[in-house]
Image (cartoon, rainbow, N blue to C red):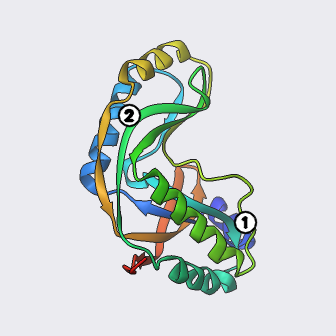
Amino acid sequence: MTEGVERSESRGWRLFVALRLPEELVAGVVEVQERLRRALADVKWVEPKNLHLTLKFLGDVPEGRVADVRRGLEAASEIQPFRIALGGVGAFPSPGNPRVIWVGLTEGVARFSRLAGAVDRALADKGFVPEVRPPSPHLTIGRVRGPANLDALKRLMGEIGAADVGGFECTEMRLYRSVLTARGPLYTILGAFPFRSTSS
């Protein structure tokens, strides 16, 4: 067991709730990453296997409370499946000052935000801290680590513009455990929560 794993175990389980991307959409996102890599900027790119759309980050949760999280997600999954499409490239805090590079949602924004709100309320009912800001739907694809070649990176982001990445039918959400290591985060799926169609 690595030192990073040991620290994580002592604090609890680092958990988040997210939507998994199908393989064909991951391939489209990787193409965007490859285009941006040509800037040779100091960016830590998210590995393809770790790409996901975060609904809620829970942080360190005692192992004994994981069952509460599961129950909350079961309650929040009483929705209809919906379509999500990805496209365009942006950055936080701004395209002119990129720190987190993302691909945006071009379809399904309202439904995604509604689901994130349902997850937040369901977990707040279980005693977890609710979000203070409204959802900002996006797919993180990289994090800037230093100033090298930022102008080239911003130029490439502008050239990509609102390019379409693709879409998929979202039918479930997943609970993940993240273990931080020197080589990057390792994600383990703790549960899948299929969306259950309702009449509303």
Residue tagged by mark 2? Answer: 33
Position of 31 relative to 20 (above/below):
above
Q: Position of residue 16 (x, y in %)?
A: 58, 65
Look at the picture and state if 173 lies above or below 52: below
Q: Are marks 2 and 1 in contact (CB under 8 Å)?
A: no
Would residue 57 be found to the left or right of residue 45 on screen? right
- Give percent across and percent down for residue 131: 71, 60
Camera-side residue of 16 and 113:
113
First in sequence: mark 2 vs mark 1? 2
Residue 1 appears in view:
no
Where, quadrant-wise, is the N terminus in this rendering? Answer: bottom right
- Mark 2 lies on a secondary structure that is helix
Which disc, if any, is residue 57? none
Count of marks, rendered view: 2
Residue 27 figure quarter = top left
Picture quadrant where residue 178 is located: bottom right
Relative to 197, is 58 on the left or the right? Answer: right
Q: Quadrant of the C terminus?
A: bottom left
Q: Label for residue 130?
A: 1
Question: Which residue is at a point 37% across and 18% down the rendered structure image?
Answer: 159
Is residue 153 something one can see in this rendering?
yes
Q: Determine the image quadrant of residue 156.
A: top left
| Residue 96 place in picture, x, y as percent | 59, 20
Q: CA distance from mark 2 to mark 1?
A: 32 Å
Q: Amino acid at mark 1?
A: Pro
Tell me if residue 173 comes above or below residue 65 in the rendering. Answer: above
- Nearest the viewer among 9 and 172 is 172
| Residue 60 placement (x, y as % from top left) | 70, 68
